[in-house]
Image (spheres, helix red, strand yellow):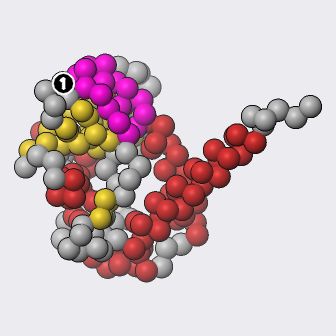
Amino acid sequence: MQSLLQPLPSLLHQLQALREAFWKEQHTSHITGTDVAAILGLGKFKDNRNPLDVYLKKKYPSQKEGETLNILFSMGHAVEAVLAEWYESVTGSKVVLNSDFYEDEERPWIGGTPDAFAYNEDGSVTGLEFKSANFMNRSEFIEGVLGMGGSICFTYEMQVRLYMYLTGLDEYRLIVYVHDGVCSEANVKVITVMR
């Protein structure tokens, strides 16, 4: 006798594939948070340094890049869930992971997908953006995300500020996890950005 639950993993896989396809379509047809610094000519990372890079990636997305994005997308979401749980345990806030695409009403070519929202005990809402790296790109990542002296780098500050604009929130937190083989709270940095 075949179980009624047997098709469930297949259905979940199909839903994830649809979500990833929607994400990719939205991010290739909109200026998003990860594009802002590059458009200003101040992009930090090798695949997104200037306005021409952004235009070419949007206009001519490669199949190989799509496959890489799917892997990174899945890995990133797994880390987001862990960091969201950690943030809840430390702050007492209720964290809700986000999958909605926010689009500017006046400029429908601007949009983005914030990672999560923290619903705080005082009734306020804080936006959350998660970043992570492993031992292979740790030093580049620390320099790129944290910048000099542990402050947020311009690339991620612009991403967070776009999400603040799209959501109307006054406070955002960038939560950075750098994996170096040791699982420790010392590997998690929280940087607050205010409007």
Residue 112 counted in the magenta span: no
Q: Is residue 131 visible?
A: no
Q: Which quadrant of the view contains residue 104? A: bottom left
| Residue at 35 percent of width and 36 percent of height | 96
Amino acid type of the residue tagged 1 in the rendering: Glu
Location of mark 1 (residue): 121
Q: Which quadrant of the view contains residue 54? A: bottom left
Total numbered labels placed on residues in the image: 1
Q: Is residue 40 visible?
A: yes
Residue 131 in the image: state x and y as whole percent.
33, 42
Residue 27 in the image: state x and y as whole percent.
40, 66
Residue 82 counted in the magenta span: yes
- Does 134 sit left or right of 34 as displayed? right
- Does 115 sit left or right of 42 as displayed? right
Residue 65, above or below 149: below
- Does 41 sit left or right of 179 as displayed? left
| Residue at 45 percent of width and 44 percent of height | 76
| Residue at 23 percent of width and 42 percent of height | 127
- Structural crowding at the residue carrying mark 1, measured as other residues with C-alpha within 10 Å and reported as few (<14), some (14–19) or many (≥20): few
| Residue at 52 percent of width and 56 percent of height | 20
Residue 126, above or below 42: above
Q: Nearer the viewer, residue 106 or 130?
A: 106
* Most frequent secondary structure within the magenta stretch: helix
Residue 82 in the image: state x and y as whole percent.
42, 29
Residue 129 in the image: state x and y as whole percent.
29, 44
Q: Which quadrant of the view contains residue 143? A: top left
Query: Which residues are drawn in magenta?
Result: 80-97
Q: Nearer the viewer, residue 143 or 43?
A: 43
For this orientation, the residue located farthest to the left is 195
Q: Secondary structure at mark 1?
A: loop
Quadrant the N terminus occupies: top right
